């Protein structure tokens, strides 16, 4: 018998369950109804497509979904489909465990144990009440999850000094001044409206909100960092620019140009330093002045009539009468004088430098648009004045909702920055790398002759960070705190940083050599000093433990990835010395050092019990960073030990379109999602072991996780269908570029793509030449000569990559060492 349609479907609870558990669900439904909830279940019963449509409609319209977990529910295709639809509609999901094992865990979110048919607790009812009542912060009990703008849907603006984020409806929710690692003026992203925002809202003629249906979309304008948001009767163009006041006073302006025929409401609500500093707003000639302690900003806005209520300014304009409206937020100045250029001329000026730079790039034929946007994003993360790169725009966007995995990434990690600049060099742009190398050398100078003491990260101007602090006045993104300022990882020892630095110098030198250096040297003296310092750091500290690339709050260990990167630093230094013919390079001792490190990695890094290279010498934990033992060439891609490691990562760390960093307990609460950079490492590992089709398929799945304007945060949780972590993340975008270039190399790209690149006059990538010389080995599937696409079973693969082959490789390594001696 069909259920009657409820009077208020917006506040209903939908129960997802297997019909095997109908008896318990009937009891649960009666209980929830006794608590005042309106409850839907899928007992209605019309048949066929009409039933499916009704089911989908109810999930779309419900306020929350309760899933009853049991072995039968785990096997139910309908439960799986209902959960998927609820996740994609961003519905709060509250799990109950009736029997068996929990198959649905939302990151760090808990489930209610009702085994034996118990009724839910008062805490569960309280969380469900909060979910049904509308937009809500994360409940103290840890149940998921408020709706809101997805992290990947935010667009980024940049000007080489700082950055800002926009929601799809053009609300400025994150903006720091004067630098990206400075306190924010707007922090709505982490604390809601009370933390500051700058919003534009179209209105009807009688001044009512038009609603989201009038929003047409958001895009970047060409190859720029200028964002255009369109509604039915309004187009808004946003960008950041820099202005020089006096001889040395460089400031940032956030410019917004409104065009169209509609009525628009403007809300300007600055809350400096997460609202900890009171902002005083005053109406002046041509706009507003904001005073906050010693900070001052001017909002040049001619023609806008402002009303100030407390510390929020509201203006309403009728574009049909006023024509285009310019909103020019000038930070660090009280200047409200008219600009020299018209709004139209300013838009053109904002586009030109970005487009001219993008036109110089040597882009692959695969994922061309995505690579271009990723390159622009990396350049937007570059701090022009110092040469440093941000790891990400934001702080404290959670890696897990409801846990403590919130970190401040608004600084320059030497490793991340070197890898970012390396990918821009790969595309043909050297200026960012050359500036960064100068920044790193200045950081090395602070070690006073002890480069092994180099910190993993510094502020954008190359200073040590202060103490990490928590901001208690804001709740965090989606109510998931804490909000942190600073990062205690700057006190760690991370010996993997030396490899990416020397690899970057090598890439710069190789690019200069390929282009022809003219009368100039292939390597500048300060760059060579940096190479020598990195090799010195390796020689002093490579054999000591460290915290490693993932920065866990644990004791130092002998991390495999750090050892591999130390080896990589020395090998690339030898490459540089050979190419530049430096006579002050001690090639003989460097070669011995590299051989010593390699021998230890192969002896202590391989774990026969798990048949893979592992996270550290003293454990059997899997770690995606172990893939670098083959990606650097420390062992050949055809080596069965590398192929077994690839298989182990694939089997135990890959989850759908993502790859987790590791599978060990790092001492932090909450689970981790897939880490985008690790996904790109597995794509490359597939390529290097001849598994082209799998590489292409995983890369396409990876691209599917990009936001609507081509940006990507740090992580993705498959269970929640939710992007997580700071945004946009340099790691994610540099990995995208690297994979696209490798996929585009001549051996892997389709013939029509190769032909198109030649017709367009592109030069082959260095990677293409290397692979053609045999670095990747034969193009086979798991080593089969025919390159067939059939999947091998785990047993077949284990036999193929058996102990006998591994022992043979060890014997070969011993012979090579003996011959070398």
Image (cartoon, rainbow, N blue to C red):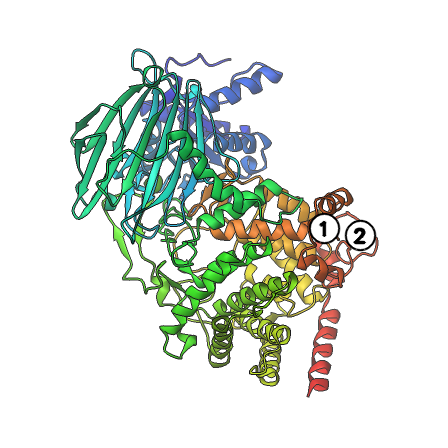
Looking at the rendered structure, which numbered label has been put on residue 787?
A: 2
Other-residue count near label 2 (Cα within 10 Å), few / some / many at <14 / 14–19 / ≥20: some
- In screen coordinates, is 557 left or right of 318? right
* Rendering coords of residue 52 (x, y %): 57, 20
Which image quadrant for residue 429? bottom right
In this rendering, the answer to whether 237 lies above or below 174 is above
> Which residue, given by chain and number where applicable, does mark 1 sit on?
692
Query: Image quadrant for the C terminus?
Result: bottom right
List the single residue furthest toward the bottom: 821
* Rendering coords of residue 321 (x, y %): 32, 15
In this rendering, the answer to whether 70 lies above or below 8 is below
In this rendering, the answer to whether 233 lies above or below 809 is above
* Rendering coords of residue 682 (x, y %): 61, 54
Q: Are marks 2 and 1 in contact (CB under 8 Å)?
A: yes
Q: CA distance from mark 2 to mark 1?
A: 9 Å
Identify the element where label 2 is drawn: loop
Which image quadrant for residue 547? bottom left
Task: Judge by depth and name the residue closer to the eye, 161 or 165.
Answer: 161
Which image quadrant for residue 316? top left
In this rendering, the answer to whether 4 lies above or below 615 is above
List the single residue furthest toward the right: 786
Residue 693 is at least partly visible in this image: yes
Task: First in sequence, mark 2 or 1: give its number.
Answer: 1
Task: Judge by depth and name the residue closer to the eye, 483 or 640.
Answer: 483
Identify the element where label 1 is drawn: helix
Residue beneath the point at 27% across and 29% down: 301
Task: Judge by depth and name the residue closer to the eye, 323 or 138.
Answer: 323
């Amino acid at each position: 018998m069909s259920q009657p349609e409820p009077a208020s479907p917006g506040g209903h609870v939908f129960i997802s369950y297997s019909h095997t558990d109908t008896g318990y669900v009937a009891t649960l439904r009666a209980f929830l109804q006794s608590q005042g909830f309106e409850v839907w279940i899928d007992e209605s019963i019309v048949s066929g497509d009409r039933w499916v449509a009704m089911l989908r409609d109810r999930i779309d319209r419900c306020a929350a979904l309760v899933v009853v977990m049991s072995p039968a529910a785990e096997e139910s295709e309908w439960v799986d489909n209902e959960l998927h639809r609820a996740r994609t509609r961003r519905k709060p999901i509250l799990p109950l465990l009736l029997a068996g094992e929990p198959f649905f865990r939302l990151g760090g979110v808990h489930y209610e144990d009702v085994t034996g048919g118990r009724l839910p607790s008062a805490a569960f009812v309280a969380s469900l009440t909060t979910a049904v009542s509308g937009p809500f912060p994360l409940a103290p009990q840890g149940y998921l999850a408020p709706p809101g703008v997805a992290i990947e849907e935010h667009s980024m603006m940049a000007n080489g000094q700082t950055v800002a984020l926009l929601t799809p409806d053009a609300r400025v929710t994150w903006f720091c001044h004067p630098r990206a690692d400075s306190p924010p003026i707007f922090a709505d992203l982490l604390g809601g409206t009370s933390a500051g925002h700058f919003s534009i809202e179209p209105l009807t003629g009688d001044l009512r909100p038009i609603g989201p249906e009038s929003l047409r979309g958001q895009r970047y304008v060409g190859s720029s960092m200028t964002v255009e948001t369109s509604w039915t009767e309004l187009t808004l163009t946003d960008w950041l620019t820099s202005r020089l006041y006096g001889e040395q006073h460089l400031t940032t302006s956030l410019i917004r140009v409104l065009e169209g025929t509609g009525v628009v409401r403007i809300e300007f609500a600055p809350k400096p330093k997460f609202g900890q500093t009171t902002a005083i707003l005053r109406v002046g000639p041509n706009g507003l002045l904001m005073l906050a302690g010693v900070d001052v900003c001017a909002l040049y806005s001619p023609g806008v009539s402002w009303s100030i209520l407390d510390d929020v300014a509201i203006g309403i304009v009728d574009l049909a009468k006023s024509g285009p409206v310019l909103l020019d937020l000038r930070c660090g100045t009280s200047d409200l004088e008219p600009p020299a250029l018209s709004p139209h001329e300013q838009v053109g000026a904002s586009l030109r430098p970005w487009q001219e730079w993008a036109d110089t790039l040597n882009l692959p034929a695969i994922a061309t648009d995505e690579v271009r946007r990723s390159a622009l994003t990396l350049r937007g993360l570059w701090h022009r004045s110092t040469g440093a790169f941000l790891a990400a725009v934001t702080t404290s966007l959670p890696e897990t909702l409801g846990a403590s995995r919130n970190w401040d990434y608004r600084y320059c990690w030497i490793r991340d920055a070197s890898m970012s600049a390396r990918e821009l060099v790969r595309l043909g742009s050297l200026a960012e790398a050359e500036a960064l190398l100068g920044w790193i050398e200045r950081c090395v100078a602070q070690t006073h002759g002890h480069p092994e003491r180099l910190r993993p990260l510094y502020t954008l101007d190359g200073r040590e960070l202060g103490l990490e602090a928590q901001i208690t006045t804001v709740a965090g993104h989606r109510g998931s705190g804490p909000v942190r300022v600073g990062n205690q990882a700057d006190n760690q020892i991370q010996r993997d940083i030396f490899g990416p630095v020397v690899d970057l110098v090598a890439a710069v030198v190789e690019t200069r050599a390929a282009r022809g250096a003219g009368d100039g040297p292939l390597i500048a003296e300060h760059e060579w000093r940096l190479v020598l310092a990195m090799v010195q750091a390796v020689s002093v500290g490579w054999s000591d433990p460290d915290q490693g690339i993932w920065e866990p709050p644990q004791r130092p260990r002998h991390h495999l990835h750090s050892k591999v990167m130390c080896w990589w630093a020395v090998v690339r230094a030898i490459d540089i010395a050979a190419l530049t013919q430096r006579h002050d390079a001690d090639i003989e001792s460097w070669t011995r050092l590299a051989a010593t490190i390699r021998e230890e990695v192969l002896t202590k890094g391989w774990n026969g019990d798990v048949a893979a290279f592992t996270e550290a010498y003293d454990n059997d934990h899997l770690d995606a960073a172990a893939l670098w033992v083959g990606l650097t060439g420390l062992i050949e891609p055809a080596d069965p030990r590398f192929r077994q490691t690839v298989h182990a990562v694939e089997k135990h760390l890959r989850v759908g379109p993502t790859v987790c960093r590791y599978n060990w307990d790092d001492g932090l609460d909450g689970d981790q999602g897939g880490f985008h950079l690790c996904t790109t490492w597995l794509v490359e590992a597939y390529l290097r072991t001849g598994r082209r089709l799998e590489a292409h398929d995983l890369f396409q799945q990876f691209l599917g996780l990009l936001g609507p304007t081509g940006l990507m945060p740090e992580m993705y949780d498959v269970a929640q269908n939710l992007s997580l972590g700071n945004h946009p993340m340099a790691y994610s975008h540099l990995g995208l570029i690297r994979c696209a270039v490798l996929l585009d190399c001549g051996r892997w790209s389709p013939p029509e793509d190769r032909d198109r690149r030649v017709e367009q006059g592109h030069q082959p990538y260095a990677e293409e030449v290397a692979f053609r010389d045999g670095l990747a080995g034969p193009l086979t599937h798991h080593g089969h000569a025919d390159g067939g696409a059939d999947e091998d079973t785990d047993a077949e693969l284990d036999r193929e990559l058996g102990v006998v082959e591994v022992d043979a490789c060890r014997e070969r390594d011993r012979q090579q060492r003996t011959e070398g001696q």
